[in-house]
Amino acid sequence: MTTQSHPIDTTAQTADTAARALADTAPAVRAKALVAVADALPAHADELVALGMEETGLAEARLRGELKRTAVQLRLFAETVVDGAYLDVRIDRADPDFALGPRPDVRSGNEPIGPVLNFAAGNFPFAFSVAGGDTAAALAAGNPVIVKAHPGHPRLAARTAALAAAALEGAGLPAGTLQLIEGVDEGVAMLKHPLIKAASFTGSLRGGRFLADIAAARPAPIPFYGELGSVNPVFATPAAIAARGPEFAAGLAASVGGSAGQLCTKPGLVFLPDDHGLDEAIAAAAAIGEHRMLDPRIAANYTERRAAILSAAGVRLIAPGTVRTDEDGQGWVTPTIAAVRLDVFRPHPDALLDECFGPITILVESPAGTDYAELLETLFEGELTVAVHRADGDDVAPLVRAAARRAGRVLFDGWPTGVAVTPAMRHGGPWPATTLGGTSVGTAAIARFVRAVAYQNAPDDALPPALLDANPWNVPQRIAPAGESTTWGDAIG
Amino acid sequence: MTTQSHPIDTTAQTADTAARALADTAPAVRAKALVAVADALPAHADELVALGMEETGLAEARLRGELKRTAVQLRLFAETVVDGAYLDVRIDRADPDFALGPRPDVRSGNEPIGPVLNFAAGNFPFAFSVAGGDTAAALAAGNPVIVKAHPGHPRLAARTAALAAAALEGAGLPAGTLQLIEGVDEGVAMLKHPLIKAASFTGSLRGGRFLADIAAARPAPIPFYGELGSVNPVFATPAAIAARGPEFAAGLAASVGGSAGQLCTKPGLVFLPDDHGLDEAIAAAAAIGEHRMLDPRIAANYTERRAAILSAAGVRLIAPGTVRTDEDGQGWVTPTIAAVRLDVFRPHPDALLDECFGPITILVESPAGTDYAELLETLFEGELTVAVHRADGDDVAPLVRAAARRAGRVLFDGWPTGVAVTPAMRHGGPWPATTLGGTSVGTAAIARFVRAVAYQNAPDDALPPALLDANPWNVPQRIAPAGESTTWGDAIG
């Protein structure tokens, strides 16, 4: 008679075994494996995009673009691995003359954190799902990844996982480098498993908080990197609206309506002058075709929340928008753009402040001289983005400082949707935008999945390659020459 | 009638106000202020060391050395601020030809996280207390610091805070940059205050877990960086003992007995060959004078835990050590070094595995051929350090890999106490050594107190100086040239 392991435990053990082998792989091997995934998925674009359209209702062009973005992301992380700056290698040679007594040779660098559990998002079935940014960052750092599939696209998730796992294994990474699990209970059980060393998540504030609390309450707590959404306020100066009103109206409608507004960065509140005169332009720009929402539950939540917003005191409709349920229970929507006067909104902002996931935004019509900086700091706690629309001559310095205190990205004369995948990008912000800061877009995302280890007086044969004087991986090494430390701070003050 | 603010709230508000002014200070100004503190404290060394001796029982030479170390630490962070690498500045210029469509200009860099609450440690009244490493790192990053004084040295804490705050203010930093609070309830209330954005702690596992859980349960959770101690296992190969037995015995006794063993890095378990033959050498080296423990509570805990260890099955005494309570209730101790055979220890390790804060260590006498790597991974979860004593010809690669998985520092042929203050040093490790990883020694400690902000298409007058093309602070900028991104990953695979 044999003891049957719990499947969650088996999956975790497999990941732990893979972690040991992965930690010893050279960066070039991991990079080639990431590129292999970046090649494999687009090679099956027709099949994958068709599955995504069917399961999520997202448009073909959007999904093809997202798949391309996912491949670019994987390639960007391949370059990040080979570049090696993320290892933060520091070498302090022994110093017999150190001010505090003879100093040993100390070298440190980042190593993989261990098996990572990634809760996939529903609204980006490629870019924030099985082979999306969190997975790419964790793999790049040398960790196996267990993805908890999003229930909104189970077949696409399974097919993506099969293709990606085969590509990784084909490129020489160990079996079990990428595994897929399904189900809320299974995800929670895995989050509690002692072999899991970090977790990532993209989704709702409620779901993220639930999981973050579990991660923090473990006997051995682990970092939980959740991206929990955002209202993404926009602030437009009178001069900006005077200079570029029609362009502003068109950009706003496109940013709110794209992908049926089901984006973490959709602008949810727009502060602009009360004499903007853009009602017609906005209504015209918002008159686009129906878009299906991701699933009936999201459509139901949107319907309810939208009704509450529209029934709040003083809210008037600029673009009424539509909500319709089809014979399969799916929701179909067009953008809703409403407005409220600041003096009505300000005393009771709570009804309108919570994120509403879907194609709706609220203009807050503000009198001349409104202190946007003060408004921003008072109303908002932590946002993924704050957008500032200004014109030459506007002094937006106080507003920008307030925005930097409250958000992870401050953008100018543009719209927060369409997050660029570049090394400098930051997709994160103070709570509740994210749980622990960090970013889930851009190459800094890899920093969430490493931990530093220092080696003191280590012989060469005990050092990781990145810390060797010979530097076989050719990574950046910050070297403090012997003797430097005796003069620390002497040049200052 | 006026409303009286709660004093905790007033302190937090003062810190928040200071945070706004501090965030705008140039690095050179903050660096000079740190150097001013580094100058001010040693200028009062006689007074401060006398206070420290009286309140903590630590020896004069130790406290003078620790004060010097504290000043070196402050100078090191002054250099870290001016150097600016910690800002992680990334600049991705606009790219109209980007693979995913025209790409905006995106720049990011680290900014101060906001007011930091630092729970001071009792065993390092300078280096991990009011003006210690956590405070220096948080100030260097541009944050105001509220220190919760350790009750073990209240007068030294108050005097240090007065001197340091005056030096900071004298160097041009805002009032309230450094504030001191006292009391457990006050510390907990401050940890819950919404204006506090991060916390640090050095102390016990129980105290650290209590506070970490509070930080995680806040309506807006904040990062809590706790350093919760460690057993710091040592593994010595037969060849190492054969080559350097007497040196090993002397080094061990000094590392266990120094500062009455009241160090987070004191070696608590020493795995060595069962035929080491070092009993006499160890007993002789451990025969040093009595040292007072920090306070009666610590002495009582030590007495109780030591008795439990010595009564465990199979434990024999090599250096018996002493414990005595004086007329003031203070405990006085000499080192205790015990031993147990691996075959007795292994089946029931729990009684001996927990950290015992004080001058005691346990040798685990292991037969030839013992698999130290397997032992290490099985017995230990997260350690500040693992020490490996080896000789030429020993294959310690598996042991080193296991050590790197379990500890933040792996050291060779030396002792973990006496943590070098250098840029590459890491003082942290997997739970329970630290709560969230990170390090509280070395310049990477600053990374715990920053958050990144990205600016998209920002005009120059809205950018922080570090992100400007003109680079007025002369900090390292990682610049991705336009066009590069169209070829990501093409050179790989």
Image: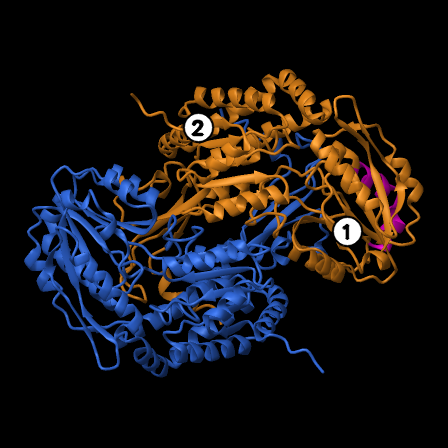
Chain colours: A orange, B blue
Q: Residues within 10 Å of mark 2 (few under 14, many from 20)?
A: many
Q: Quadrant location of residue B334?
A: bottom left
Q: CA distance from mark 1 to mark 2?
A: 45 Å
Q: How many marks?
A: 2
Task: Please report, as a chain letter, where disc 1 is located.
Answer: A
Let me know if residue A248 is in the magenta part.
Answer: yes
| Image vertical order of residue B473 relative to residue A45, above or below | below
Q: Amino acid at mark 2?
A: Thr
The mark that comes first in sequence, 1 or 2, is 2
Amino acid tagged 1: Ala
In the image, which disc is placed on residue A177? 2
* Residue A493 visible, this orientation: yes
Task: Examine the structure image and report whether residue A35 is included in the region drawn in magenta.
Answer: no
State which quarter of the image contains the N terminus of chain B: bottom right
Residue drawn where x is 36% and y is 72% of the image: B125
Q: Where is mark 1, residue-wise?
A: A351
Q: Is there any visible trace of residue A469 in the rendered image? A: no
Give the camera-side residue of B178 and B36. B178
Give the label, 1 or 2, closer to the camera.
1
From what the image shows, is residue B105 above or below residue B226? above
Q: Which residues are magenta?
A: A237-256
* Main SS category, magenta section: helix
- Residue B314 point in image, percent of width and height: 12, 50
> Residue A454 location, x and y as percent?
35, 49
Task: Locate residue A292, reporting x and y percent.
Answer: 76, 27
Return the residue found at the far front. Answer: A1
Q: Is residue B269 left or right of residue A394?
A: left
